[in-house]
Image (tube, grey):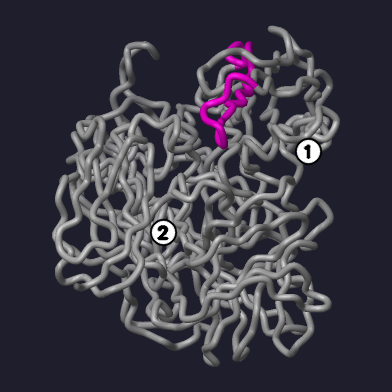
Amino acid sequence: MKSFQYYPFAFALFLFQIVLLNANAQERLTPLTSNSVIKNYISEHPIAALKTQIVDTLDLPFVDDFSATDVFPDEQKWTDKLVFINNNYAIKPITINVATFDGLDANGNAYDQFSPNSQGYADTLTSRPLYLLTKPSSLGGGQYTLADSITMSFYFERKGYGDGTENNDSLVLQYYNPTSATWIHQWAVDGTITANNDKYFTKVELRLRNANFLVDGFRFRFINYGGLTGSQDNWNIDYVRFYKAKNLSNVMDTALVDVAFTQPGKSLLINYTSIPWDHFKSLSNVQQQALIKDSLRVDYRVNDIQNEDVGFNNRIYDFAGNYIAGFGAANGNILINRPKNLDQSYNLPVDSLFPLNPSLTVDSTTFTIKNYFSNSNSFGGLNTNDTISYTQKFYNYYSYDDGTAEAGYDLYSSPNGKVAMSFDIIKPDTLRAIRIAFVQQLAHVSNKLFTLKVWTSLTPEVTLYQQPNMKPVYTNSVNGFSTYVLNQILPVSGKIYIGFQQVAVDSGLHLGFDKNTVSDTIGNQRMFYNRTGTWDPVAIAYGSFMMRPVMGSPNLFVGLNENNSDISKVNIYPNPVSNDLKINFSNPEKIRQTEIVNIQGQRIYREAFSNNINLENLPDGMYLIKFTSSDGTTIMKKFVKRNN
């Protein structure tokens, strides 16, 4: 039987130089020492993640704003996979997605897992070889000279939503000369943060002035120098160009002509990213509309274009791809007379309620919100940044967060410290479980105990439920949530608070903290902590605790109800079981994987589907068995292990 594998880090020293401290409270945000998004991507794309590069030489121009891929760089342009492509870590990027440099390797692990203060060169982003001597036929052929004004340009940002850089950190640019087989320093900047320069991007332009680089097979690369023990000392890079600039009357024209989205799609719900579908359907039309935003904000940038007409469109589709609602014509005129090179936003009206039927299942459904520029190609630039999509979830849980953590939240020096998050339960229902994302950082705390708690009031404090002897569990998935199943049926309605009370004195429990999704429109009015008997709103930063109450179904679907699932007809027996657990599916060919987790949420078994699992050596207790189909559908069942 396979055991759940942790990713421990053999150090317990607190890295105070990388911790954000609040002078008025014993709270802190700390950088991650593992990237669950990368780990999940590798597990789902093992061939793509490990594929050997076929390195072809590329013609100029070289252009990448990182909008074409997620997680790893575009292998058609880059030869390594060390930076993290994402839309979470940058503040006001130039276009959607950036390349984030940190202290994590291509597998999402710290470069140095054993030396707390280790520093050195970390991530590298290396271009594929370029023709820098031979001109393509599209440019008339021949050879490049220095008179062609070949230019490198890019944008960089210190920190963003990640961990701050220090003055001894740096971002470096190097050029490679294949003739001498050497990398030569061209540019660098240190990590000193002043005057809010960690909240905006700075443009860099470098004209090529050394003829020795005018050779075919030329390459360039970015490297960051900083901490090697996690996602720390973050740098973000956006919109890299290496190209032949235009000379207009002896003035070099390096304009970036592009219309692009800069932020990912947003939830249509006010505050929430998910509400149980059957809860939403129980409301009147007026009440439903009150939970949906009157307008949806999209963020974009007009790069070196002014007084132009660009058509904007919004479309909403149900789970089956049927058109629900939309906004905008071919030419929406939303960019007329807008200042160029500035971040812009547009609020489109949301004037249609979702049809309540059909829905995917009784308690779950999804909608796709697509925003796109319809005629931006006429202005040049990249096409990949002209469209953004968002999946609006109505699953069996409430959530404020977007599923990704940019930091971990701790109460330090706080024995018996508590954290809580409030939720307004729309419809009286049963609370079945609590999902919590614990993130890997600093000292490994998976053996530290906490008590899972549910409150109906914090002031005065009224405890509805508690379950002691829980432990943090690390989960390598996009969401990275561990499910803590309640050991009793718990009816809930109205406002509830979910959270935990820690036991350890020396550190917190590394609760996932989503820094770019605020749980309340007026600040942190839903997140609380208690160190000394008094509950206070979280003050260290705006964001969302990554905790979710799971409602309704006793089988704990991840967004799917068993009655409508293709893998719904399953029997497990005997239950209780002492030795062999038998599994009977109506369509076993659709089952890809079986997992078993204990009541603390720790995975202790994961294998391909089998209709018989030997549990002879499993300790007595309650367990969950989870089945995953080939299309990602999941179903869970409870069973009890009991020796005769």
Give the residue drawn at x 56%, y 40%. 395
Q: Residue furthest front?
A: 644
From the top left corner, tell me how far across and down residue 249 is, in percent. Answer: 64, 21
Classed neighbour count for the residue bearing mark 1: other residues with Cα under 10 Å, few (<14), some (14–19), many (≥20):
some
The image shows residue 208, relative to residue 502, as above or below, that is above
Quarter location, residue 199: bottom right
Mark 1 or mark 2, whichever is nearer to me = 1
- Highlighted range, magenta: 357-379
Q: Which mark is residue 133?
A: none
Quarter location, residue 55: top left
Q: Residue furthest top?
A: 330
Residue behind mark 2? 35
The reply to whether the magenta stretch includes residue 394 is no
Residue behind mark 1? 291
- Specify the amino acid type for callout 1: Leu
> Which element is circle 1 on?
helix
In this view of the protein, can residue 252 be seen by the observer?
no
The image shows a total of numbered marks equal to: 2
